[in-house]
Structures are given as structure tokens and as C-alpha cells.
Amino acid sequence: MLGFIQNPIKSLFHKEHPFVEKDSLFYEISDAFETKGCPVCHLLDRYEDQYMEALFYESVNDGNIRMKMEQSQGLCPLHTQKFLKAGDILGLSILGADLIEEWLIALDRNNEVNTTCLLCEQRSQNERRLNLAFARYFYLKEFRDAFESSAGLCKKHFRQIQTLINDQNLAEALIKIEEAKIEKLIANLYEVIRKHDYRFQNETIFDRETEAIRRVWEFLKK
Ligand SMILES: [Zn+2]
Ligand SMILES: [Zn+2]
């Protein structure tokens, strides 16, 4: 009889997908597992920085990027702040003049269009690409193992990726890994709370505990 009893977690990991290729994105996400937060958020921020840099340094010469920028007619409040921080005076002036002149022309013609923020659009395209890739690589044991030793996904990306994993066992494996990470974070937060009790005030609050506070808030991010 004993021979029939299997470790449930282990049996979930027997699935392998023959068609999943380890392309460059596989290695990018795997590297992002070594950072202190959600790997998808980490890569999205990095791609966004690279894209903003390209907007500044290539838009002056690249007609395609410049046209996209003109069509976007400005950025959302968050990206406006980021753009102002990242940009240099010349780039901001050239692009700013372009965009505001386009707006004036539209105003004259009475055909002002309400477009979405170019950087938000870019971010959601990248997000979709990363989520799909993550769900695909999750068929590979090597990827799941690497994910297990990472900081885990944030709430938003966990939900998005979970809905993309069609295999029931693998979707459950994702939940199990994520839950274990969250439970550790909660335990650390309760330690911080306990150490604020006057009876335990002499106890040191460890770095991993303060780090857990940051991670919980990062996890909850919308
Ligand atoms: Zn995330
Ligand atoms: Zn935006």
C-alpha cells in the first residue's frame, strides 16, 4: 500500500512541457528571480527605463518613435514625473515643443484626441508578454525551482499569471509556492509587532523583518 502514497507536491512537479524553449526571455526572468521583489515588476521597470532612454536619445532622429510620441499627446501623471526626472534639458525641450505644437494644431482644427499614455501602453504590452512567457516557462521544472527560491510575484502579477496557466496541477503549484512566501512575510511582520510590546522591547528587529514590511507593501501594490 505504502508504494501508492506519493508526495503531493512532488507529483505536481512531474509535468514537463516538450514544446517550451529556453529563449532569451527565459534567462531574463530567471535572472530577475534573484532580485528582492516581483520579477515581472522588476523587468517592467527596467524595460520602461530603457524605453524612456530610447525616447530621449533616438526620438530626435527616429521618425517612428517621434511620431508615436506626438500621437500620444503627453503622458499620464506618473510617467510625466518619471520622464521629467529621466530626461535631459535638450531632449525634454525638443519633444515638449513637438508635442505642444501638435496640441495647438489640434486645438485650431478642433480635433483634439484623447489618447492613452505611450509609456502606459508600452508597459501593458510588456506585461502581457512577460506574463505569457512566465506561464509558458512554468512548465519547466528548472523554472519552477528558480521561482521557488525567489521573492515571489506581487499580487497583481500572481493573479494575471495564474489565469494563464491552463494546467490545473501547475496552477496549484504556483499558488502553493506563493502562499508559502506570503506566510513567511506575515510571520516576520508579527515578529516586528511582538517586539514592539514593552515586554520584548530589548529584542533586536532583524533586517529580514524590516525587509518583510517593504515586501508586503510591494506585494499589495495595485
Ligand atoms: Zn509584479
Ligand atoms: Zn503612463
Image (cartoon, rainbow, N blue to C red):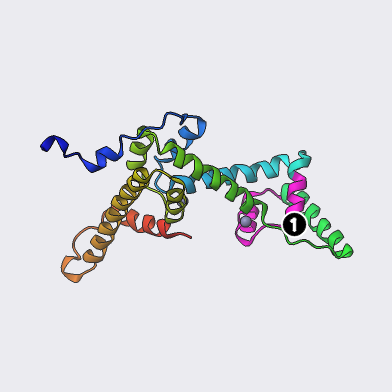
Residue at the spot x=11%, y=37% of the render? 2
Pick the front one: 101 or 138: 138
Residue 195 is left or right of residue 135, and the answer is: left
Residue 3 is left or right of residue 185, and the answer is: left
The quadrant of the picture occupied by the N terminus is top left
In the orientation shown, which residue stands out farthest toward the left? Answer: 1
Tell me the crowding category of disc 1: few under 14, some 14 to 19, or many 20 or more residues within 10 angstroms, Cα based. Answer: many
Residue 62 is left or right of residue 17, and the answer is: right
Residue at the spot x=50%, y=43% of the render? 132
Q: Is residue 108 above or below residue 63?
A: below
Label 1's element?
Answer: loop
Q: Main secondary structure of the magenta part?
A: helix
Q: Is residue 39 shown in magenta?
A: no
Residue at the spot x=34%, y=35% of the render? 15
Range of residues picked out in magenta: 66-89
Q: Dividing the picture into quarters, in which one does residue 84 lie?
A: bottom right
Q: Amino acid at mark 1?
A: Gln
Where is residue 55 shown, x and y percent of the image? 69, 44
Residue at the spot x=33%, y=55% of the render? 212
Q: Is residue 80 shown in magenta?
A: yes
Residue of label 1 = 73
Where is residue 108 shown, x and y percent of the image? 89, 64
